[in-house]
Image (cartoon, rainbow, N blue to C red):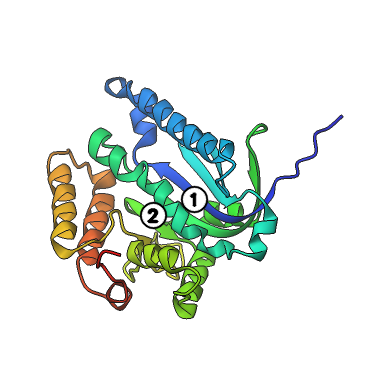
């Protein structure tokens, strides 16, 4: 009997690839890269089980690693919860997922990610290793469009973000809204490849913006990391665009100014 896939979900999908993956797995002096890649996959699978096995957790994380691509799906375990909780605020939970690996792997292992977050309906079957649906199709068309190190929003997630900013529901979702405003910023210089329309303008800030001194410190840590690396022409623009974006994160903007940094 054929198995019926009944894992329809609504939420966010993050699709990632790793800078220089193909070079890393073919050069002898990068043999340890496969160990790092396996460790990354294990990290995601452990986090998936963490959400799955805890009955008090309403969030479901799906993970699929294939070649140089990682797909992470974030949704509610039950569709019934959508009646009492706006699933669009799950974007705040995606921040915790990204924070669990993005800067750690960059600073400690010099593994750099490029990715795109989309929002919509999808099917994810972890046993059969199948991922499909509208949002999967969308992010797969956008995640290779950016020429940098970083994570941006595809149009569907961008329109969700602008909706949340416009409604500004500080009564029912104050913490989630504050987190989203802190980490997703408008960036009109998002570096897309020549054949892609320049319609995406929001990106994920790599660190929590607490105050200007801490922001500057994180910016300088990244500069220090990049200054101790070899920069081949093939990838140099990606590093350049990443630093350009982080410098932009230091500048005040209306969305940032709307966030309170006072304790409590």
Question: From mark 1 to mark 2, how far is it between C-alphas?
Answer: 9 Å
Pick the residue in front: 152 or 250.
250
Image point (41%, 64%), residue name: 175
Q: Quadrant of residue 216?
A: bottom left
Q: Looking at the picture, does residue 197 appear above or below residue 105?
A: below
Pick the residue in front: 30 or 211.
211
Quadrant assignment for the C terminus: bottom left
**Could you tell whether 212 is left or right of 134 in the image?**
left
Q: Spot the residue most to the right.
A: 1
Residue 26 spot, x, y in % from top left = 37, 25
Q: Residues within 10 Å of mark 2 (few under 14, many from 20)?
A: many
Pick the residue in front: 48 or 30.
48
Using the rendered image of the protein, determine whether residue 119 is visible from the camera's viewpoint: yes
Quadrant assignment for the N terminus: top right
- Give the residue pinned by disc 1: 14
Q: Looking at the picture, does residue 6 appear above or below residue 262?
A: above
Image point (38%, 54%), residue name: 151
Residue 101 spot, x, y in % from top left = 36, 41
Residue 65 spot, x, y in % from top left = 51, 35
**Could you tell whether 149 is left or right of 64 in the image?**
left
**Could you tell whether 59 is left or right of 203 in the image?**
right
- Give the residue pinned by disc 2: 151
Mark 2 lies on a secondary structure that is strand
Do the residues bearing badges 1 and 2 touch, measured as CB atoms within 8 Å?
yes
Q: Residues within 10 Å of mark 1 (few under 14, many from 20)?
A: many
Mark 1 lies on a secondary structure that is strand
């Amino acid at each position: 009997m054929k198995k019926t896939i009944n894992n329809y979900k609504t939420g966010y999908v993050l699709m990632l690839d790793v800078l220089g993956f193909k070079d890393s797995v073919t050069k002898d002096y990068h043999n340890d890269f496969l160990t790092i890649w396996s460790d990354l996959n294990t990290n995601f699978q452990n986090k998936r089980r963490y959400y799955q096995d805890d009955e008090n957790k309403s969030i479901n994380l799906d993970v699929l690693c294939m070649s140089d691509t990682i797909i992470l799906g974030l949704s509610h375990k039950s569709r019934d919860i959508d009646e009492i909780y706006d699933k669009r605020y799950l974007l705040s939970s995606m921040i915790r997922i990204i924070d669990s690996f993005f800067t750690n792997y960059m600073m400690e292992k010099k593994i750099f990610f490029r990715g795109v977050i989309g929002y919509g309906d999808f099917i994810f079957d972890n046993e059969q290793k199948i991922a499909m649906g509208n949002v999967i199709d969308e992010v797969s068309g956008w995640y290779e469009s950016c020429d940098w190190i970083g994570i941006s929003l595809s149009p569907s997630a961008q329109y969700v973000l602008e909706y949340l900013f416009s409604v500004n529901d500080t009564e029912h979702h104050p913490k989630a809204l504050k987190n989203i405003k802190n980490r997703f910023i408008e960036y009109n210089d998002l570096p897309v490849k020549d054949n892609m329309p320049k319609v995406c303008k929001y990106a994920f800030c790599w660190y929590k913006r607490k105050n200007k001194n801490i922001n500057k410190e994180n910016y300088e840590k990244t500069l220090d990391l990049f200054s101790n690396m070899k920069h081949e022409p093939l990838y140099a623009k990606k590093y350049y665009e990443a630093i350009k974006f982080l410098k932009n994160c230091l500048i005040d903007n209306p969305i940032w100014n709307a966030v309170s940094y006072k304790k409590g």
